[in-house]
């Protein structure tokens, strides 16, 4: 490894993405495997709640989380000690087999990375023993479409052997520089692709960024106001005193999230913010989640119960946004032309923006009675 780290790009070759004829894209990859889905199911996934399934205290809390979290994820990867991996795997199978998840909560698993000594056991065990309960497998450190192709075939073989009738979907974590460079290929690599999450901790390390935080901003990553100008346009005294000029933190993750959102939107899959590690800083967590929501993400990870409500609040449109979208829709009639509402121009394009809000609100309200009441104009806890 050079001092600059392993990702210097030396040895990289320009490669053409592998071609699959359109007619083959939706064919099962093993005889007897379930038919791949043509569209990602649009069940709510505002918070992907992480738990260590080998931890008895955490596992005991599962029944209380059903119906409260959109996604419950059994984590087998980072955060679980090597000697506890088998217990975590067995615990996840037990939770999957003994829990009624109802219609509002999905079960996902984060398996170990594809180069690890544990992933083959993770996949073979989970598909054989709990494949009919598992909605999505989250795969860490995905580097390119080749990782998804490997998984795609392996899952098809395992599904066929287990006699599954519904394909298990795949969610990639974007946490290597190569993964970011290949994100469009990853998003479109298989009809199994459900979505992609930002993995800011591993990504920071892989890129050799100099932050030690898990997601969020950094006080050193900022833009500072210009020094006050003298009447002749020169530099005023005090130009070198930072405190006298306003400074604003910038978002370290803006580029990656925006790129991930475009890749996902282009392929009809779903983008997510990943973990926010400063559990105590609920304000910054909410800000970071909201940035991701505004940019197009549908959810984020919750690492602690306190982040569940933050994600629910942030990733559900506000009552005010829904009311505004309904007004625009009503005013726009057949959807063409332009109208003025409260001094603002609305037209075909702004109606489409409003439809994004309305469709999301309708989908969420279908499984969240509090939101249904809120959007119907009845009092509820939710605020925008
Ligand atoms: C998540 O896995 C991360 O590395 O941030
Ligand atoms: Mg990671």
Image: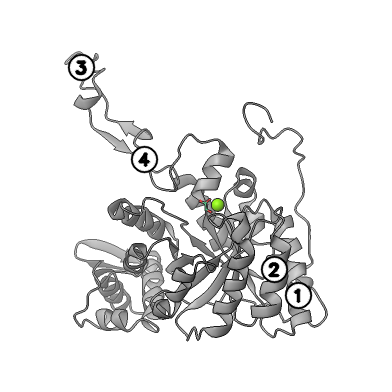
Give the number of the disc on residue 238.
Answer: 3
Tell whether label 1 touches label 2 (CB within 8 Å).
yes
Of mark 1 and mark 4, the one earlier in the sequence is: 1
Q: Eyeballing the image, is 100 above or below 230?
A: below
Mark whose residue sits in front, 1 or 4: 1
Name which residue lies at 59% across and 62% down.
76
Visible in this render: residue 335? no
Which of the 4 image quarters holds residue 233? top left
In the rendered structure, which disc, 2 or 1, sits on the residue that comes first in sequence?
Answer: 2
Label 1: element kind: helix
Residue 138 location (% of width, % of height): 59, 64
Rounded to the nearest angstrom, the CA distance separating label 3 from label 1 is: 68 Å
* First-in-chain label (3 vs 1): 1
Give the number of the mark in front: 2 or 3.
2
As drawn, is 9 to the left or to the right of 97? Answer: right
Q: Residue at x 36, y 40 (%)?
A: 250
Query: Depth check: 13 or 326 in front?
Result: 13
Check disc 2: other Cα within 10 Å, few if <14, some if 14-19, many if 20+: many
Q: Closest to the observer: 87 or 318?
A: 87
Badge 3 marks a residue whose secondary structure is loop
According to the picture, the residue beneath numbered tag 2 turns out to be 123
Q: Which badge, 2 or 4, comes first in the chain's sequence?
A: 2
Disc 2 Cβ-to-ligand 2 distance below 8 Å: no
Residue lying farthest right? 31
Q: Earlier in the sequence, mark 3 or mark 4?
A: 3
Residue at image mark 1: 158
Q: Which-is-in-front pick, marks 2 and 4?
A: 2
Residue occupying the point 51% across, 57% down: 261
């Amino acid at each position: 490894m050079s001092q600059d780290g392993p990702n210097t790009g030396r040895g990289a070759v320009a490669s053409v993405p592998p071609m699959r004829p359109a007619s083959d894209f939706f064919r099962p990859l093993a005889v007897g495997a379930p038919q791949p889905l043509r569209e990602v199911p649009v069940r709510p996934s505002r918070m992907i709640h992480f738990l260590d399934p080998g931890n008895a205290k955490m596992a005991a809390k599962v029944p209380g989380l059903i119906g409260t979290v959109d996604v419950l994820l059994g984590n087998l990867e980072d955060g679980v000690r090597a000697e506890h991996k088998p217990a975590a795997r067995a615990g996840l199978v037990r939770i999957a087999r003994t829990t009624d998840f109802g219609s509002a909560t999905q079960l996902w698993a984060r398996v170990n990375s594809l180069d690890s000594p544990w992933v083959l056991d993770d996949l073979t065990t989970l598909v054989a023993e709990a494949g009919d309960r598992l909605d999505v497998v989250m795969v860490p450190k995905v580097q390119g479409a080749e990782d998804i192709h490997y998984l795609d075939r392996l899952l098809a073989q395992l599904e066929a052997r287990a006699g599954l009738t519904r394909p298990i979907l795949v969610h990639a974590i974007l946490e290597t520089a190569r993964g970011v460079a290949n994100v469009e290929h990853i998003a479109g690599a298989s009809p199994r692709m459900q979505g992609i999450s930002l993995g800011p901790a591993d990504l920071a390390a892989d890129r050799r960024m100099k932050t030690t935080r898990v997601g969020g901003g950094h006080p050193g990553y900022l833009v500072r106001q210009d020094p006050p100008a003298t009447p002749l346009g020169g530099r005023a005294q005090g130009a070198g005193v930072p405190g006298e000029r306003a400074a604003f933190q910038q978002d370290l993750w803006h580029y990656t999230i925006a790129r991930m959102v475009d890749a996902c939107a282009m392929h009809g899959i779903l983008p997510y913010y990943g973990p926010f590690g400063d559990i105590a800083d609920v304000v910054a967590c909410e800000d970071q989640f909201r940035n991701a929501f505004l940019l197009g993400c549908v959810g984020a990870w919750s690492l602690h119960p306190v982040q569940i409500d933050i994600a629910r609040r942030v990733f559900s449109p506000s009552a005010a946004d829904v009311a505004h979208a309904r007004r625009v829709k009503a005013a726009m009639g057949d959807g063409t032309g332009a109208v003025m509402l409260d001094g603002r121009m609305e037209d075909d394009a702004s109606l489409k923006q409003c439809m994004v809000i309305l469709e999301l609100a309708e989908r969420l309200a279908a499984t969240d009675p509090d939101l249904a009441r809120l959007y119907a104009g009845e009092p509820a806890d939710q605020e925008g």
